[in-house]
Amino acid sequence: MRLLLHACCGPCSLEPTRILRAAGHDVSLFFSNSNIAPESEYARRLATLRAWAQGEGLPVTEGARNPDAWEAAAGRIGAAEGDPARREARCRACYRLRLEDAARFAAQAGFDGVGTTLSVSPYQYTGVIREELSRAAGLTGVEAVFEDFRPFYEKATRRSREMGMYRQNYCGCRFSEAEAAAERAARKAQRAAERAEQAAAHAAERAADEAARAARRAERAAYAEKQARKRAVLKALREQERDRDTHENQ
């Protein structure tokens, strides 16, 4: 079928496009991501996608960038602040806005179906993405083409790195940037704590080994001292016996 594939970025598009084209679909990419902030980040991700897609012979259409609409839909929900349910609700609103835009364009441009690359990331809500894609497709009369691409995430990561493709370190919105930074800091702190714990364990192990070696040295020294005393006693006894023999022979 003629398939419009909503693309969140270049790296996440690598494996989905390969798989869908191999399945016989005529794939075109649609970049509708009003969530991405700041504008320089948006431009960089779009440029990365376009540069790669051109080499692959994949058409790329840019949807309308409307940060105000995103703020009204998802931004109003705000930061998760440790509340997973709130984060999921914000992401759902974000998916809905972007996938509805993609589905509308697919219907207007005569595509048979609409899909998304969002499901390649293990950091996204895959079930929610599927629900929102089906919902958006149902509203416009095109077919929802969903596939869970997460098993191909590692391959996409490796390929994008080998290609020198720009790889972002947060989902896109201003909240996800702060949350990703906090998560990275937490992982860094955890790794530091683990290293400190391992260092302490190694230090304790070395101290225990040294204590055991010291105990063995002390044991050997005590044994040597005991043997020396025994030899001294035997020597004294032998000398007394010689003295006695000498006195008796006189």
Image (tube, rainbow, N blue to C red):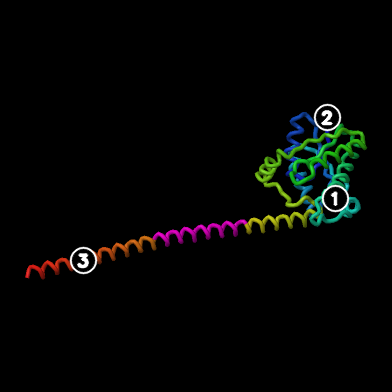
Query: What is the crowding at mark 1: few (fewer than 14 residues within 10 Å), some, or many (at least 20)?
Result: many
Which part of the image, by quadrant, shows the N terminus? top right
Amino acid type for the residue under numbered disc 3: Leu
Q: Give yes or no for residue 211 being in the magenta stretch.
A: yes
Q: Is residue 231 above or below residue 52?
A: below
Picture coordinates of residue 175, whole percent (x, y): 81, 55
Amino acid type for the residue under numbered disc 2: Met
Tell whether 1 sits left or right of 22. Answer: right
Amino acid type for the residue under numbered disc 1: Arg
Query: What is the crowding at mark 2: few (fewer than 14 residues within 10 Å), some, or many (at least 20)?
Result: few
Residue drawn at (77%, 50%), measured in percent from left and top?
A: 171
Tell whether 230 sits left or right of 56. Answer: left
The image quadrant of residue 192 is bottom right
Q: CA distance from mark 2 to mark 3?
A: 110 Å
Question: Quick one: label 2 or label 1, which is nearer the N terminus?
Answer: 2
Q: CA distance from mark 2 to mark 1?
A: 32 Å
Mark 2, secondary structure of its residue: loop
Q: Give yes or no for residue 74 being in the magenta stretch.
A: no
Residue identifier under label 3: 237
Residue 73 disc label: none
Picture coordinates of residue 220, whole percent (x, y): 36, 60
Q: Is residue 226 above or below residue 101?
A: below
- For the stretch drawn in magenta, the main secondary structure is helix
Q: Is residue 198 above or below residue 245?
A: above
Mark 3, secondary structure of its residue: helix
Residue identifier under label 2: 1
Residue 90 disc label: 1
Query: What is the crowding at mark 3: few (fewer than 14 residues within 10 Å), some, or many (at least 20)?
Result: few
In the image, 84 versus 26, the foreground residue is: 84
Give the residues drawn in magenta, as a range. 194-216
The image quadrant of residue 249 is bottom left
Tell whether 245 sits left or right of 207. Answer: left
